Amino acid sequence: MKNPEEATDGKQRIHLRPGSLRGVARAELHLLPCDVLVSRPAPVERFFTPAVRRDADGLHVSFRGRGLRGEEVAVPPGFTGFVMVTEEMGEGLIGKLNFSGDAEDKVDEAQEPLERDFVSRGRCIIGATSSFSHFTLWGLETVPGPDAKVHRALGWPSLAAAIHAQVPED
Amino acid sequence: MEYLKDASKKMKSGLLFVKLASPHSGEGAIYLIDMCLQQLFEIKVFKEKHHSWFINQSVQSGGLLHFATPMDPLFLLLHYLIKAGKEGKYQPLDQVVVDDTFPDCTLLLRFPELEKSLRHVTEEKEVNSKKYYKYSSEKTLKWLEKKVSQTVAALKASKVSVGARVQSSAYFSAVQVSRDKEEDYVRYAHGLISDYIPKELSDDLSKFLNASRTSSFRAKPSVKGKLKVSDEPVEAKEDYTKFNTKDLKTGKKNSKMTAAQKALAKVDKSGMKSIDAFFGAKSKKTGKI
Amino acid sequence: MDLSELERDNTGRCRLSSPVPAVCLKEPCVLGVDEAGRGPVLGPMVYAICYCPLSRLADLEALKVADSKTLTENERERLFAKMEEDGDFVGWALDILSPNLISTSMLGRVKYNLNSLSHDTAAGLIQYALDQHVNVSQVFVDTVGMPETYQARLQQRFPGDRSDSQGQSRLPVSCGQCCQHLCQVARDQAVRDWQFVENLQDLDSDYGSGYPNDPKTKAWLRRHVDRVFGFPQFVRFSWSTAQAILEKEAEDVTWEDSAAEEDLEQPGRITSYFSQGPKTCRPQGPHRYFQERGLEAANSL
């Protein structure tokens, strides 16, 4: 996916490593009401988590001197959240990423000719590094509440199920 | 980057993200195919300004949340069937579902029960035990009508407000939903289904729904007059405009689709880079432990 | 001073008070208000009230409390203890405003500036004394901001012409110094024993006076900046000194009410409004259901 042209040519396949979806560790997630314009390691458990307070009207914390109010949000029933990472083939660090998972994946590849073919072509691979069943949603000074777009978005899977269900025969 | 994936399915399978022609726009969109269970998933992404994630001990800019939800492959096949249907003859599927831009469309032919579901949208003939298909707009409209009605039922069940105005669910949900009229639901469901079919078919469907509803309401001419409103996209357009003046994000999107899409591709790419960077660092850490 | 309540949770505000001496319920009292730690970029701001019957001002004088600023921390502590012993005629209360409370107030969607925060805190303490049925006859406050508006504000809140923020009549020195002591003792102790909310390693307390122009303070801030989180909550993010360091040394963060954001979007809104006309013929945008939920089809991962 490094080259956008390649990504849009339609031949691009991204392989989701099925082994990575099994038995991954749980992740703790917070969705913030601000955009930190960088993706990088951050000492969340040193600065943020210990500052979270729970009282009668929910969760409180502050980030960068601004007050946040939060609530727990569950992933829709029947679904699991995964944190996914692309693993560019040929880059050194990929091999280390999921040591125990590797052997398992090789078994899968052997069973799936298509997959093996795909891997040998050196295409992009995506894998889950962790999973989640809920996350903390934060609003700036107010609890996001049911009107928050995220909350509404989480209703999508149930409507999608209706749209895409097979229609009854006449 | 997060994915919500149906966990009730067994995971031991080949899972592929592929780019296929969106049945609505014809442009490329990402779908997930489970090669083992032969299932298709649509990928929608939640994207709102000013969000980012804390994921364990890291920050992820953008705050994207991807949804992978099961999708009826017939919508994607329809795109090709309609195209081939213009030639007006019966053709074998492997001649119909071909695409130089999105060659992975042939994966759609692997889905089980394909033949059964093709009956909803095609006429078929069998010659020398080989099947030939021809797009049928009559059948398709009937099929889509059923899609609309099951969508209406789900909209009602999930208390989605379908009235002309955007309502706050916190203050209006209960009252509003009871006030929304059947025609509003049908129009709304038609709009949703229209996201999965070409524009022309959407227009035809609108007329079709109108006609069938009018016939069922023939006894009440007053309703008939009102129902007419629901058929024209003019009304839907008005809804969009109303919404756009309120929400400039979507306004931008509507006014310049291709430019916006280019911009999105850029955003996503930079997002990927940072993910790699971050997880690289993380994997080193786990290596130590 | 027992600040254990503050140590349990120093993310908000914390009120401490003495028992109300019986004599203060009966006899008319003077009440003084003072503050400490308004200027520093670090630590809490403390507001205190002290009240004493007019008839006992001479006794208060006899305690010989010198100007707090000339005393060492130890001497102040000792004086506070002495004041406590004489609790039969001097009452007090104080409000400790955590740096986090100051930051989140001043940086709120609706800005709550330090003057208003100060005024409201002082007024809150006076109200507290009244609620305890202290027989307050005169109130003296140190002025912050405009004396006139402050006085008007106090008089509106406490009708009866008991307040004087303009210093026309003077707060008895002894009472004023009591307030000052209280604030200083509380602030010093709170800073010294600050329980960092964060789990920080390599934390040093070599932050000097805490005033923004102190090079030691600045150096401490630079040492303890985190690229994502900025500073520990001990720091007042709303101070320009802190913000300047963050701008240079921390990652950019955008909020929905960021000033730059509004400037950017204003012209965009107009352009897209006018360009709507001919292009709506192709309503290619996702259905309103998706727009209202921030959902769109993924065209890349």
Image (spheres, coloured by chain):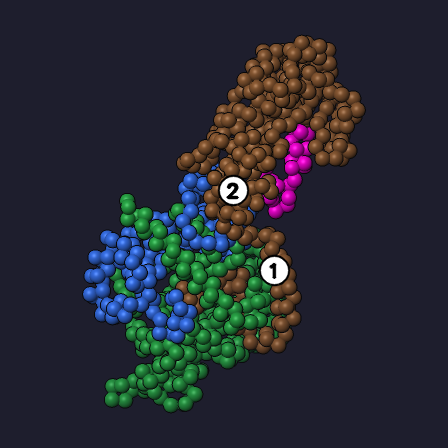
Chain colours: A blue, B green, C brown
The answer to whether residue B40 of the structure is visible from this angle is no
The crowd level at tag 2 (other Cα within 10 Å; few <14, some 14-19, many 20+) is many
Please give the chain letter of the residue carrying mark 1: C
**Residue B134 visible at all:** yes
**Which one is in front, A133 or B115?**
A133
- Which picture quadrant has residue A103? bottom left
Please give left or right for residue B155 compared with residue C239 in the image: left
Indicate whether B71 appears above or below A130.
below
- Please report the residue visible at 38 percent of the width from the left and 68 percent of the height from the top: B31
**Magenta segment, prevailing SS (helix, strand or loop):** helix
- Which amino acid is tagged 2? Ser
Check disc 2 and report the residue beneath it. A62
What span is in magenta? C100-124
What residue did someone put label 1 on?
Answer: C264
Residue A136, above or below B204: above
Mark pair 1, 2: CA separation: 26 Å
Instruction: Name the residue rendered at 58%, 71% in the picture.
Output: B255
Please name the residue shown 43% across and 50% down the image: B59
Q: Quadrant of the C terminus of chain B?
A: top left
Q: Secondary structure at mark 1?
A: helix
> In which chain is the residue bearing label 2?
A
Image location of residue C117, percent across then percent down: 65, 35
Left or right, C65 with respect to B82, comes to right
The three-letter code of the residue at mark 1 reads Leu
